């Protein structure tokens, strides 16, 4: 593409295509052929933009395994943190009280279990019960923490627009909840079913040995 005529949007589009081609192990010529166009027309299409031939971009997106919108605009669910830092960022430690306040009553967090060669981490729906965190899982599933075993639990929140956020980490041990009355109370207290679906009737309580957190804000 001619650098003198390409605008920022054109370069971003070309970059997305280049990255996806590398992931798929395709060349630009192979992409053009599979999209039923010549390499020369492919270059002209990229330089002209989507309004010139929407159908051509649809074919390109199909070959790349992307949606039309994802090809032209990028992923709407892309990971946060791609922008620059705030103008005057400050990193502060949270007190235990502030950590629990941010955990709230429920949400989605990540449980980390010991494994070789490194820990296994799983996203889970959780609820807060007193000063403990609980999640439900399949009794035979990968996210089962052994009773009495070490476990970590992490929750974070990022505001991409303001470039601020926080993170809370709990380190402690796991308990399997077996008391029927407690199981019923927790099930009634739960605000949502586990997103992963299936039979997830084992409640695991994370009993903190320590809780820590950090917050980034802008002065």
Image (tube, helix red, strand yellow):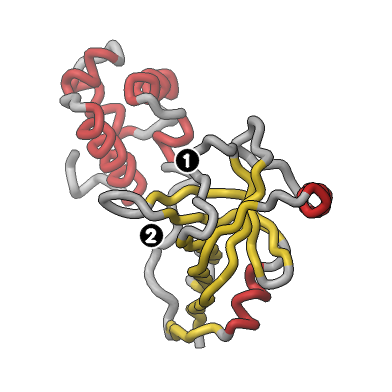
Residue pointed to by mark 2: 82
Locate residue 74, reporting x and y percent.
42, 42
Is residue 155 shown left or right of residue 36?
right
Is residue 60 shown left or right of residue 142?
left
Residue pointed to by mark 1: 142
- Mark 1 burial class by Cα count in 10 Å: few <14, some 14-19, many 20+: few
Badge 2 element: loop
Nearer the observer, 140 or 73: 140
Nearer the observer, 143 or 61: 143
The mark that comes first in sequence, 1 or 2, is: 2
Is residue 123 shown left or right of residue 54?
right
Identify the residue shown where x is 66% and y is 32%. Answer: 199
Q: Going by the picture, which residue comes out furthest to the bottom? A: 219
Locate residue 69, reporting x and y percent.
48, 34
Q: Going by the picture, which residue comes out furthest to the top? A: 36
Nearer the observer, 58 or 5: 58
- Mark 2 burial class by Cα count in 10 Å: few <14, some 14-19, many 20+: few
> Could you tell me if the residues under marks 1 and 2 are in contact, i.e. CB atoms within 8 Å?
no
Locate residue 137, reporting x and y percent.
60, 42
Q: How far apart are marks 1 and 2 (CA)?
A: 31 Å
């Amino acid at each position: 593409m001619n650098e003198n005529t390409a605008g920022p949007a054109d370069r971003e589009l070309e970059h997305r295509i280049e990255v996806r081609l590398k992931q798929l192990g395709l060349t630009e010529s192979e992409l053009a052929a599979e999209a039923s166009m010549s390499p020369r027309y492919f270059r002209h299409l990229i330089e002209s933009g989507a309004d010139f031939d929407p159908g051509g971009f649809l074919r390109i997106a199909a070959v790349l395994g992307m949606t039309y919108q994802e090809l032209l605009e990028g992923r709407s669910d892309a990971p946060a943190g791609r922008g620059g830092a705030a103008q005057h960022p400050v990193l502060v430690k949270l007190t235990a009280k502030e950590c629990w306040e941010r955990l709230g009553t429920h949400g989605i967090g990540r449980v980390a279990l010991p494994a070789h060669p490194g820990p296994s981490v799983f996203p889970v729906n959780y609820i807060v019960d007193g000063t403990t965190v609980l999640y439900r899982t399949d009794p035979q599933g990968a996210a089962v923490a052994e009773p009495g075993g070490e476990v970590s639990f992490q929750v974070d929140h990022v505001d991409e627009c303001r470039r601020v956020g926080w993170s809370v980490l709990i380190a402690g041990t796991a308990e399997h909840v077996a008391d029927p009355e407690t199981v019923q109370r927790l099930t009634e207290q739960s605000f949502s079913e586990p997103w992963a679906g299936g039979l997830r009737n084992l409640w695991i309580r994370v009993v903190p040995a320590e809780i820590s957190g950090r917050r980034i804000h802008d002065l």
